[in-house]
C-alpha cells in the first residue's frame, strides 16, 4: 500500500479533537534511508537505522511529504505509536490556509474590485521541501523568491500589461494541488482601472527593489 494511503487510513482512525500523533516509518529498502531523511527533514524526525519517528499535528500534516515519498518510489510502513487529544487553544489561522491553492486563488480574485487591473501576490508554501517543484510548476507566472524562504511572489494582470492572466494563475495552482503541494495565497497589492501610456504597467518598489 502506498505511504499516502497508509497515512490517510491512520488519520481517519485518530480520535476527534486529536492534537498530536507520534508515528513510526520503517523504510523497506536500506539504500533509501538517507534520501528519506532529507525529505522528512522539515518534520525533524528521530532516526534509528532505516526507521524514523516523527510527531505530527493537525496544522503540521505530513500528507504532502508522504506523497512526495511515494513519487520518489519509497516503500515502507507507517504505524501509529501514540496520540494525544484534548482541548487546545484556538489559534486564528490565515484565511484559506488549509484550502486547495486553486480555490484560495479563485476566492481571492472574487473578492477584488471588478475593475482591478494589476496585482502583486505571493504563495507561502507549507514546507520548503515543496519549493523546487512548486517553482517549476509555477513557471508561467514568473515567480520570484522574496519575503521568506518558502515564499514565491508574482505579478498578475487582468486585461493588459506586465503580469500573468488570472486564468493561467489558477491553472498553475491546480497543478500544485494535483501534487498535494499546500500553502497559503495572499494578494499583497492591487490597482484598479490603470491606464498604460507607452509602458507595460505600474512598477512597485518593495524593499528597494522594483517588482
Image: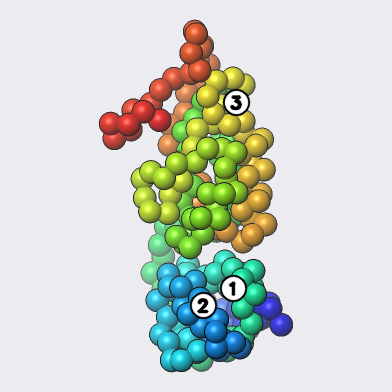
Q: Decide if residue 155 is on the left or right side of residue 70.
A: left
- The CA distance from mark 2 to mark 1 is 7 Å
Q: Can I make out residue 57 in this image?
A: no
- Please state, as top left, top right, bottom left or bottom right, where the C terminus lies in the image: top left
> Could you say which disc has been placed on residue 36 in the image?
2
- The CA distance from mark 3 to mark 2 is 42 Å
Percent position of residue 80, x then y: 55, 88
Q: Are marks 3 and 1 in contact (CB under 8 Å)?
A: no
Q: Are marks 2 and 1 in contact (CB under 8 Å)?
A: yes
- Please state, as top left, top right, bottom left or bottom right, where the N terminus lies in the image: bottom right
Percent position of residue 105, x then y: 58, 43
The residue identified by callout 3 is: 158
Q: Residue at x 38, y 53 (%)?
A: 149
Q: Decide if residue 85 is on the left or right side of residue 147.
A: right
Q: Secondary structure at mark 1?
A: helix
> Could you say which disc has been placed on residue 69 in the image?
1
> Which circle's residue, 2 or 1, is located before the other in the chain?
2
Percent position of residue 65, x then y: 54, 69
Which of label 3 and label 1 is nearer to you?
1
Amino acid at each position: 500500500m502506498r505511504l499516502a494511503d497508509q497515512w490517510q487510513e491512520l488519520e481517519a482512525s485518530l480520535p476527534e479533537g486529536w492534537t498530536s500523533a507520534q508515528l513510526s516509518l520503517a523504510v523497506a529498502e536500506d539504500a533509501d534511508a538517507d534520501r528519506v531523511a532529507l525529505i522528512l527533514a522539515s518534520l525533524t524526525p528521530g532516526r534509528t537505522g532505516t526507521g524514523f519517528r516523527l510527531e505530527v499535528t493537525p496544522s503540521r500534516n505530513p500528507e504532502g511529504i508522504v506523497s512526495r515519498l511515494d513519487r520518489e518510489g519509497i516503500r515502507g510502513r507507517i504505524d501509529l505509536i501514540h496520540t494525544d487529544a484534548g482541548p487546545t487553544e484556538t489559534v486564528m489561522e490565515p484565511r484559506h490556509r488549509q484550502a486547495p491553492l486553486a480555490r484560495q486563488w479563485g476566492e481571492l480574485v472574487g473578492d477584488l474590485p471588478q475593475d482591478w487591473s494589476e496585482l502583486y501576490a505571493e504563495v507561502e508554501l507549507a514546507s520548503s521541501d515543496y519549493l523546487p517543484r512548486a517553482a517549476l510548476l509555477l513557471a508561467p507566472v514568473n515567480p520570484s523568491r522574496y519575503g521568506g524562504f518558502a515564499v514565491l511572489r508574482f505579478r498578475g494582470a487582468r486585461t493588459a500589461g506586465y503580469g500573468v492572466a488570472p486564468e493561467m494563475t489558477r491553472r498553475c495552482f491546480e497543478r500544485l494541488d494535483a501534487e498535494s503541494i499546500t500553502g497559503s495565497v495572499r494578494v499583497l497589492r492591487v490597482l484598479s482601472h490603470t491606464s498604460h501610456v507607452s509602458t507595460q504597467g505600474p512598477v512597485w518598489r518593495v524593499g528597494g527593489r522594483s517588482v
